[in-house]
Image: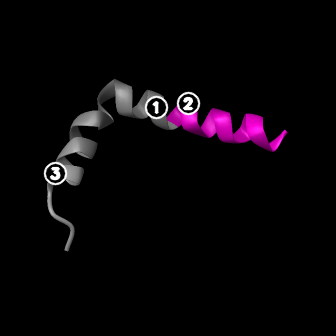
Amino acid sequence: MKATFIALGAMKVAFMAWTGGYRTASRAFTRPLP
């Protein structure tokens, strides 16, 4: 039960990254952390 919930969360994050969040995510990762 918990595995499916985690899988759904991962799919949601992957979908968000695929739709357009990938650009902002990559920009945040490239930017040095404070």
Q: Are discs 3 and 2 less than 8 Å apart at CB?
A: no
Q: Secondary structure at mark 3?
A: helix
Q: Amino acid at mark 2?
A: Met
Tell me the residue at 28%/44% (across/down).
25
Q: Are discs 2 and 1 less than 8 Å apart at CB?
A: yes
Q: Does residue 34 sit above or below 29 in this rendering?
A: below
> What span is colored magenta in the figure?
1-12
Residue 31 position within the rendered picture, expressed as x and y whole percent measured from the top left: 14, 57
Residue 34 position within the rendered picture, expressed as x and y whole percent measured from the top left: 19, 74
The N terminus lies in quadrant: top right
Q: Secondary structure at mark 1?
A: helix
| Res. 29 mark | none
Q: Amino acid at mark 1?
A: Ala
Asked if residue 11 lies in the magenta stretch, the reply is yes
Which residue carries the number 3 mark? 30
Residue 20 position within the rendered picture, expressed as x and y whole percent measured from the top left: 29, 30
Q: CA distance from mark 2 to mark 1?
A: 5 Å
- Mark 2 residue crowding within 10 angstroms, few (<14) / some (14–19) / many (20+): few
Which residue carries the number 2 mark? 11
